[in-house]
Image: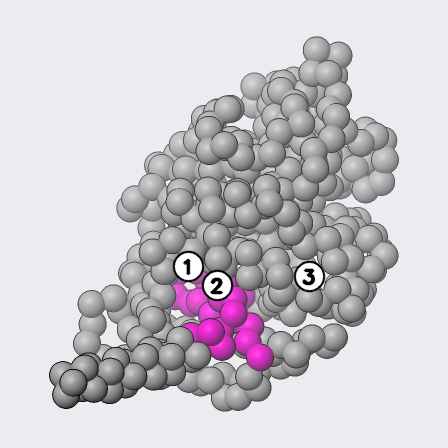
Amino acid sequence: MKKYLILLFCSSIFLFSCGEELTEREKIEAIYLTWDSTPMNNINICWFEKDDAVRKVLLRKKGSSDWNPYKTNSSSIDYTDYYYYNLKVSGLQPDTEYEFRFEKSQNTFTFKTLPENLTRPINFIVGGDLSVSSTTRKMNRLAGTLAPDFVVWGGDIVYEDGRPEKADLVIEFWKDWYTHSTVNNRLIPVVSAIGNHEVQKGYGGTPAEAPFFYKFFPSKDGRPFRALDFGNYLSIVILDTDHTTSIPGRQTNWLSTTLDNRSHVPHLIPVYHVPAFPSHRSFGGHPTAAVREHWVPLFEKHNLPIAFEHHDHTFKRTPPIRNGKIDETGVTYLGDGAWGVATRTVYDPANTWYLEKASPTHHFFMVTIEGNSAKVRAYNSDGNVFDEIQRSGRIQ
């Protein structure tokens, strides 16, 4: 009897302790990582919870004995009882694995900074048009299993249309991303272009009309177009296809200067939402024609080998294109955004001069850069590679 009582007492203590720990963990309902500046030395740790408090995060190099404390405040999310936290950590070492945990929890998460130089292959995923769906969750799991260095979304993430009253849908999306892309507690940094379904008007809107995008993907200059530089070997150029910034004028001038200033970078890759060479929508529609008029000549001038487009809810690959015709020295356009949304019909490549391949296939692209080579593999929702190309870095 005494043994039974002692066992019952000890079990009660154990359950109480575990319950206290689980309660602490459960406060954090979704975590994601992003960058508002250089990926070699910085990270933004972002999360959602229902407590409004000054939260302490402990971080260290993996394997180190000493934790470094960081604190951050929260901001409320209208129409919900959630709070949002964004902790920026600077001064990190390149190509180094870090781990962090929340105070009072022993549950640790890991991430890895990017190298200063191309001393190893770099793998990243590009895809767009996600939504909250079973297919999206399946693709999220695949992304986590493939363990890329980072992910770039091409816009139309949640389909909340910038409406504050749809905040619960946005949080549901982030919970799905956190739950299904996190493998062995490893978190994958993600950045995104803006799409029409981030904005109340779709096109010609203002930052105030895209509140979730601007809140959850902050940039150093507060703009939706920017260049994310990875040392001297890779620059991801994120653009806004007239959702909150017009294509001609300020943005195109910035793009021209940005490409000029990165003449030394072998892998210079633009990512944006609406395609210049659509596989479903009208070739002459807006802003498709504006992308071809203002940006495509700059891509060709600077000999960019690939560009990523989205929006049409299809898969497509073009042949290399220069000056409006097939040319082996031109740009290959990859798209068209079908991570999780329902797919659409496509133009027949046999009757469409600018399409090499097209199909209504859920997919994302895995890009591997190594030396002067960029290999791009298209994965479908079954985890199979169904298309693959390899292109050299641009001619400088």
Q: Is residue 150 left or right of residue 8?
A: right
Q: Spot the residue most to the top.
A: 350
Q: Is residue 217 left or right of residue 208?
A: left
Horizontal and vertical percent for residue 287? 81, 42
Q: Which quadrant of the view contains residue 343?
A: top right
Asked if the residue under mark 3 is in contact with the one under mark 2, i.e. CB atoms within 8 Å, the reply is no
Q: Which residue is mark 3?
A: 169
Q: SS at mark 2?
A: strand
Bin the neighbour count of mark 3 within 10 Å (Cα to Cα): few under 14, some 14-19, many 20 and up. Answer: some
Asked if the residue under mark 1 is in contact with the one under mark 2, i.e. CB atoms within 8 Å, the reply is yes
Q: Which residue is mark 2?
A: 33
Name which residue type carries label 3: Leu
Q: Which residue is mark 1?
A: 187
Residue 37 belongs to magenta span: yes
Bin the neighbour count of mark 2 within 10 Å (Cα to Cα): few under 14, some 14-19, many 20 and up. Answer: many
Name which residue type carries label 2: Leu
Magenta-highlighted residues: 25-50
Say if residue 292 shows up in the picture.
yes
The residue drawn where x is 34% and y is 63% is: 110
Question: In the figure, 117 relative to 396: above or below?
Answer: below
Name which residue type carries label 1: Leu
Q: Which quadrant of the view contains residue 14?
A: bottom left
Q: Nearer the viewer, residue 130 or 82?
A: 82
Mark 2 vs mark 3: in front: 3
